[in-house]
């Protein structure tokens, strides 16, 4: 059993309801398939990863300097 993610989604509920892609629970192969199929782009995945890292950082204090 996998532990629940600390942040359930980086996307607003309205976006998720419209079928927007959310990478929180996906593994690397699933993400690659979604990019290959056009369901998401690498830029979208990167933005979600950055947003999630910045959202979690106050609790874990792991990021010293965010790089754009």
Image: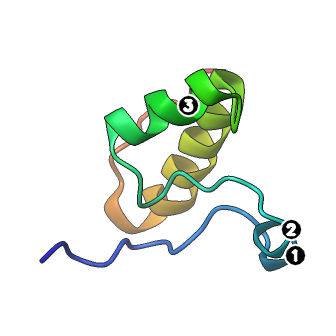
> Which residue is label 2 attached to?
18
Whole-angstrom CA distance, mark 2 to mark 1, is 6 Å
Locate residue 45 relative to residue 19 in the image: left or right: left
State the image coordinates of residue 39 (x, y, percent, origin top left): 69, 38
Other-residue count near label 3 (Cα within 10 Å), few / some / many at <14 / 14–19 / ≥20 = few
SS of the residue under disc 3: loop
Residue 60 percent coordinates (x, y): 33, 61
Between 34 and 44, the one lying in front of the other is: 34
- Look at mark 3 in the image and give the residue it sits on: 66
Residue under label 1, please give it: 14
Q: What whole-number distance in Å separates the C-alpha atoms at marks 2 and 3? A: 30 Å
At horizontal 62% and vertical 23% (from top left) the residue drawn is 42
- The picture quadrant where one finds residue 12 is bottom right
- Residue at 86% of width from left, 68% of height from top? 18
Residue at 69% x, 24% y: name it.
43
| Quadrant into which the N terminus falls | bottom left
- In three-dimensional space, the C-alpha distance between marks 1 and 3, rounded to whole angstroms, equals 28 Å
Location of the C terminus by quadrant is top right
Circles 1, 3 touching at the beta carbon (< 8 Å): no
Q: Are marks 2 and 1 in contact (CB under 8 Å)?
A: yes
- Where 51 sits versus 6, above or below? above
Of callouts 1 and 3, the N-terminal one: 1
- Find numbered disc 1 in the image and state the secondary structure of the residue it sits on: helix
Q: Nearer the viewer, mark 2 or mark 3?
A: 2
């Amino acid at each position: 059993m996998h532990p629940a993610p600390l942040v359930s989604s980086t996307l607003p509920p309205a976006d998720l309801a419209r079928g927007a892609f959310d990478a929180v629970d996906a593994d690397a192969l699933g993400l690659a398939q979604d990019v290959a199929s056009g369901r998401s782009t690498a830029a979208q995945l990167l933005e979600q990863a950055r947003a999630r890292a910045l959202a979690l950082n106050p609790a874990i204090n792991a990021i010293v300097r965010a790089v754009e």
